[in-house]
Image (cartoon, rainbow, N blue to C red):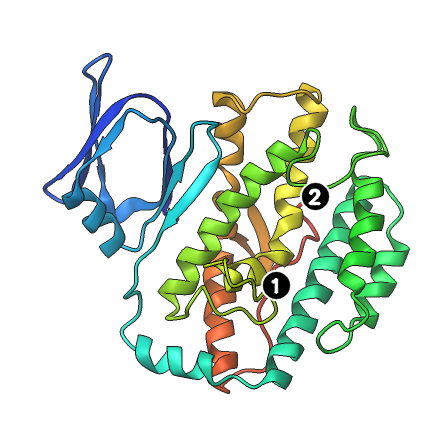
Amino acid sequence: MIKRTLYFGNPAYLKTQNEQLVYEAVDSGEIKQIPVEDIGILILDNQQITITQALLAKLIGNNVAVISCDFAHHPAGLFLNLDGHSLQSQKFQAQIEASQPLKKQLWQQTIASKITNQAALLESHRLPATSLRNWALKVKSGDPTNLEATAAVYYWKYLFTHTAVGPDFRREREGAPPNHLLNYGYAVLRAVVARNLVASGLLPTLGIFHRNQYNAYCLADDIMEPYRPFVDKMVCDIVRGNGLFLDIGPAIKKALLTIPSMDVRIKGEKSPLMVAVQKTTASLAKCFEGKARKIDYPEFAGFA
């Protein structure tokens, strides 16, 4: 079953009763109940939301990724379970002891997959992608020549060419629209990946490439890379249908919150993105344990 992504953007009181999340709207008095076991991601986007400790503990205990948004309505924090797998200590140890050559090989696979999916997205819009295809084949262990960055410059130059954005788009976190849409979509994707890393018994903090001492989700940032083009596709579609200067209002958020249920292809089969991420993180855990040599990543082909 695909876990639900819930978004709360109005003043509300959230509590738990009989294994349910109970939502009470402050303004209207409306009451709703959702089984906690059905929830995968919960987004809190109002400064007047009150949530009980009992509910928060139950959500975390059911491996729900809880995202808290700031005054600007941007995701600012992420709560995750610290005990997500029955063999967690064993898997932690395997992850910690992973050799540098193994990490470099895994990063090579990650970047090659990301560039391949970027190429497929450009091709779906009949944009040139031959260079990306060639670079994907040339990525070496650890990506020492930083083909990821080379591909990114090319990719972002062309992706929004046929939209109101034009060819001058620059991907920057604080940059011009539609960077704000990409940021929001990536935050949702990051939560999906972090949640499934924990479920696979891994530490989201210990990356295979990212090592920022201030980043608690380095591994999530690594593993989400090949999934980014799926978010890019959604943002591209939103811009094509609605124009460039968009506020992240309810309709836009509703669209971006469907990211976990997007169709991808993984291991030759069609799968919702959230389920595909489960397969990816499980395969990563096997690589750390020496039971596999390849991470299972999604393919963009067929879902453009």
Q: CA distance from mark 1 to mark 2?
A: 16 Å
Q: Is residue 155 left or right of residue 219?
A: right
Q: Nearer the viewer, residue 140 or 297?
A: 140
Labels 1, 2: front one: 2
Q: How many marks?
A: 2
In what quadrant of the picture does the C terminus appear?
top right
Quarter of the rendering containing residue 90 = bottom left
Number of other residues with Cα within 10 Å of mark 2, as a class: few under 14, some 14 to 19, many 20 or more = some
Dot 2 amino acid type: Ala
- Most distant residue in the top direction: 28
- Could you tell me which residue is drawn at 30 percent across and 63 percent down? 82
Q: Nearer the viewer, residue 194 or 251?
A: 194
Q: Is residue 112 above or below residue 96?
A: above
- Could you tell me which residue is drawn at 73 percent across and 66 percent down? 112
Q: Is residue 22 above or below residue 154?
A: above
Q: Position of residue 79 (x, y in %)?
A: 34, 50
Quarter of the rendering containing residue 44 = top left
- Most distant residue in the front direction: 213
Disc 2 secondary structure class:
loop
- Could you tell me which residue is drawn at 83 percent across and 71 percent down? 138
Q: Which residue is mark 1?
A: 268
Q: Is residue 255 left or right of residue 246?
A: left
Q: Is residue 84 left or right of residue 56?
A: right
Q: Position of residue 189 (x, y in %)?
A: 52, 48
Q: Mark on residue 304? A: 2
- Could you tell me which residue is drawn at 53 percent across and 68 percent down? 207
Q: Nearer the viewer, residue 3 or 64?
A: 64
